[in-house]
Image (cartoon, rainbow, N blue to C red):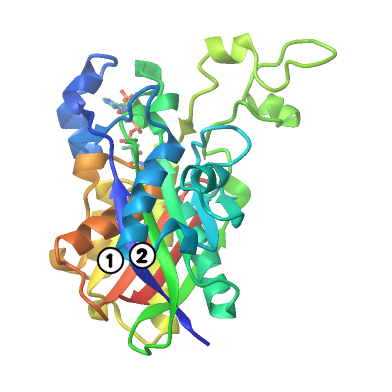
Amino acid sequence: MPRSIIAGIGMYVPQNVFTNYDMMKYMDTSDEWIQERTGIKERRFAHRTNETTATMGIEAAKIAIERAGITEQDIDFIIFATLSPDYYFPGCGVLVQRALKMKEIGALDVRNQCSGFLYALSVGDQFIKSGMYKNILVIGSEKHSFAIDFNTRSRNISVIFGDGAGAVVLQPTKDNNRGILSTHLHSDGNDAEILALYNPGTHANYWKKGLADYEDAEVGGLYENHTMIDKGQNFPFMDGPTVFKKAIIKFPEVIMEALNQNGYKSSDIKMLIPHQANLRISKFVQEKLKLNDDQVYNNIDKYGNTTAASIPIALCEAWQYGKIKESDLVCLAAFGSGFTWASALMKW
Ligand code: ACO
């Protein structure tokens, strides 16, 4: 059975740099608080009208396709991971297919938030291993800035997120010393509402949980209404401490699962690319696995948390800086809303 390799990788971040000091113009926060609790100094925000989740993904995809030495016409499947799609429906995959004038290939959208890219990578890996496709484009992209509540009431979450995109092209290889060795996907829906954007949504039966205010009407009004908007219930909610506690357990667990399955120890990792949730989480994982600074790549200070885009952006940067070379053992790991968490172990 062939393995999948990342034959090309690309990233795109908007030009507009939005610092913690810029954030302070909109809410009661400080550079010191944000840096100390999250490690973030600045993030990128997409142009309000000219850049979208799909357009950023397309820019990253063009680079990945060129680096894979193929053309858009060679791509035979698209997988697009995002929680901030251009439209509620259809998904972003078809927008990529259209913009890049690709053949009438399949396009799948993945809604798994911070672990979205790894879920997408895992799906792509299975299609490559089965022989169904030969050039799969996997994209992670987010335009968080469209749904950030620039208001002190949401400051614990608003300061965390940034915009950007990353993309890879997966191809089959018969080289035993390269490729994705395994992927590991998990979920626990008990805490689904701990980190979530409730509205617009169809969760009418949950109204007693206080997730939204419904107007007393016979029809309509259950999806999104003025009361919800007035109360800011159309912005993301996060119970940060609960996310933190679960993340620092599940990150090391899913990394060890990948290492154990393939007979490796944490010291064998050449580069760990954790989802850039929060620098404190990454540092905790690093300490727990006894990894040195050279074995972990973090760039949350520059880009914030870009959710489905954070792993491909960090992986792309690490590779561009020469920190990852052919056949190096690379581990990708993520944890996020759902909760869902995942890892992928590969020989680059
Ligand atoms: N600026 C200043 N003060 C703030 C801010 C802010 N941006 N946000 C919260 N505070 C205040 C709160 O109001 C509170 O004040 P109080 O004690 O007077 O009431 C105090 O700081 C502590 O608030 P908490 O919400 O308990 O903040 P905490 O210390 O837990 O830090 C944080 C918040 C950074 C989000 C933390 O919970 C955390 O790291 N959680 C992990 C979640 C995470 O990283 N999520 C990323 C997205 S999900 C993912 O990618 C996995």
Q: Are marks 1 and 2 in contact (CB under 8 Å)?
A: yes
Q: Residue furthest right?
A: 218
Residue drawn at (27%, 70%) of the image:
289
| Image quadrant in which you'd find residue 319 | bottom left
Q: Amino acid at mark 2?
A: Leu
Mark 1 within 8 Å of ligand 1, using the beta carbon: no
Residue 290 appears anywhere in the view: yes
Q: Position of residue 220 (x, y in %)?
A: 77, 16
Q: Position of residue 51 (x, y in %)?
A: 38, 30
Tell me: residue 84, above or below residue 110: above
Q: Amino acid at mark 1?
A: Leu
Element marked by disc 1 = strand
- Please tell me how many numbered marks the rendered image carries: 2
Q: Which residue is mark 2?
A: 332
* Closer to the camera in the image, 90 or 31: 90
Q: Which residue is mark 1?
A: 272
